[in-house]
Amino acid sequence: MINPYWELVILLVLVNIIFAQSLNIIIGYNGQFALGHAGFLAIGAYTSAVLAIQFKLPIVLSILSACLLTAVFGYLIGYPCLRLRGDYLAIATLGFAEIIRIVLLSLPAGIFGGPTGIRNAPNLKMFLPRLDFLNAPMNLLFTILFAVVSLFVLVWGLYALSGAVTKPLSGILWFSKRRTAVRYALFAVLLASLGLYSTTAGKTFLSIFQFHKAFSEESLKSVQWELFLVYLIVVAIVLVIFRNYINSSIGRAVIAIREDEIAASNLGIDIAKVKLMNFTFGSLFAGLAGALFAHTIPLFKPLDFNFFKSVDVLLMVVLGGMGTLSGATLGAAIITILPESLRFVGQWRLVIYALMLIFLMIFRPGGLLGASAAAEKVLRRLAPKPVPERDTQGVKG
């Protein structure tokens, strides 16, 4: 089994992947700089929670209703903002998010919780079927799966860090010829440094991934694996929907508008219609993320959806790489896990967190998996090599 605290963190990673993708479709693919995305998350969370608690609506219908209402708000805020660009659109959407937060504070506390928020919204775990004969082996399987993924991400992160550190040295003649060797040497040093703290790291690892509880009584009664499976299926479906959307004619129009609005208009693309449709589409999935958020954590309040929440999701998209599904997914995982994994350093956690982000953005301004960097590499490989000119002058005899 996985530690209950880290179980919640993993679920929040999956929720934030959906949230980050919903903003990525607006900023990364359409180029609309929206800075109030937390407002849509709040609408989805409060709508689904209130419908499930106060009106006893089935949880699936509550989530679908939250998605639809969030899409309506996305349309209402997107329509008057069609002519706004850049900072002006950011300010308008930020104002919308603050209005939502203040309205939630002012609504009847008996229904919406007021400043203290909503407690104990129905958790998805409550509605999962009991399959006790599968609980122990499936919990062990998912524990191994997430343990392997975490180790892979850790090793890949150290390798990427070594590459980022050695990249600026490529301008030096000696390092330019030995950059690969220096990178592997630094990577080995980082792994060795990690090995020095192997005892502490091992204890932490085993406290998160509790293999010794695989067939305990607690594991036999736990539906943790079903919860992970449901969230993973939802995330997979969302990613497939976004991929198909981007590859559709509408998605191509969205990207064309991002690249050049005038050229897109000359091609017959209705700029206003496509922008509004895309903004509404992204808002709908922000509502889905909000609804899942409400049914994942035991308490949420209006303060959870403030300006900093909008900045967090923006960091997820920018850090991972705007305009890529994989980039927003990786960014969501890093921004969610990094602050939690640095709690052992106490008050220095946020300082280290900020320095790591600054470091990454300096050496990877396009994001960890930025589309521009990937496209540049592909084009460089596909570009024909220049053919040396032949001497056309006659040979003197």
Image (cartoon, rainbow, N blue to C red):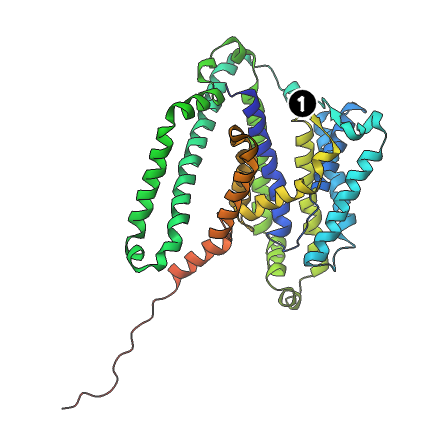
The correct choice, above or below, for 213 with respect to 352 in the image is above
Q: Position of residue 281 (x, y in %)?
A: 68, 46
- Is 356 displayed left or right of 201 in the figure? right
State the image quarter where residue 268 is shown.
bottom right
Question: What residue is shown at x 61% (from left), y 59% (from top)?
Answer: 258
- Is 359 displayed left or right of 244 in the figure? left
The 10 Å Cα crowd at callout 1, few under 14, some 14 to 19, many 20 or more, is some
Q: What type is the residue that disc 1 sits on?
A: Asn
The correct choice, above or below, for 139 with respect to 60 in the image is above
Asked if residue 204 can be seen in this view, the reply is yes
Question: What residue is shown at x 43% (from left), y 21% (from top)?
Answer: 203
In the structure shown, which secondary structural element does the residue marked by tag 1 occupy? loop
Residue under pointer 1? 123
Picture mark count: 1
Nearest the eye: 158 or 41: 158
Q: Position of residue 257 (x, y in %)?
A: 63, 60
Nearest the eye: 163 or 250: 163
Farthest residue in the left direction? 397
Q: Position of residue 349 (x, y in %)?
A: 54, 34
- Is 152 displayed left or right of 296 in the figure? left
Question: What residue is shown at x 54% (from left), y 37% (from top)?
Answer: 333
Quarter of the image with the C terminus in it: bottom left
